[in-house]
Image (cartoon, grey):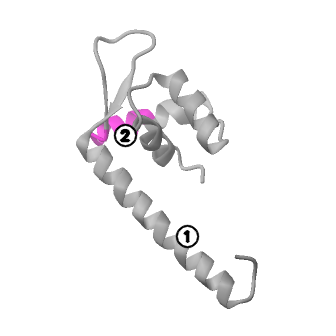
Amino acid sequence: MNDPNLLILTSLASGEKHGYGLLLDIEGFAGVRLGPGTLYGAIGRLEERGLIQPVGEPQRRRPYRLTAAGAEVLRAQLADLGTIVAEGNSRLAAAGGPP
C-alpha cells in the first residue's frame, strides 16, 4: 500500500512529526520512500481538509499532528482495508490458492 495520505495519517497516529520524520517513519513501517514533492503535496491537501494541522510557530522543520477528523478518516480507511483483506483471503481460500 503506498497511498501517501493513508501513510501520513498512519504515521501521525503515533504522534507529532515533521516532514523528514514522516519520511523516515513511513519508510520504516511501510517500506515506502515518498519523494519530497509527494510528501509535501499530500501534507498540503491533508491540512486543507482539516485532517492534520501544524503544531507551533512556522519554522524550517514544522511538526504536524493528526486532528480528530483525521483520526476518524484513518479509522474508516483502515476498516475498509480490513474488509478488502478479509475478502481477498476468503477468495484465495475458496479458489484453493495460498492462504
- As helix, strand or loop, the secondary structure at mark 2 comes to helix
Residue located 55% across and 70% down the image: 85
The reply to whether callout 1 and callout 2 are in contact (CB within 8 Å) is: no
Q: Earlier in the sequence, mark 1 or mark 2?
A: 2
- As helix, strand or loop, the secondary structure at mark 1 comes to helix
* Number of dots carrying numbers: 2
Three-letter code for the amino acid on which mark 2 is drawn: Leu
Residue 85 numbered mark, or none: 1
Three-letter code for the amino acid on which mark 1 is drawn: Val
Is 61 left or right of 30, judged from the image as shown? left
**Comparing labels 1 and 2, the label whose residue is closer to the camera:** 1
Q: Which residues are magenta?
A: 43-51
Quadrant where the N terminus lies?
A: bottom right
Residue located 52% across and 71% down the image: 84
Is 18 left or right of 28, judged from the image as shown? left
Residue 49, quarter of picture = top left
Q: Is residue 55 above or below residue 10?
A: above
Residue 46 numbered mark, or none: 2
Residue 67 in the magenta stretch? The answer is: no
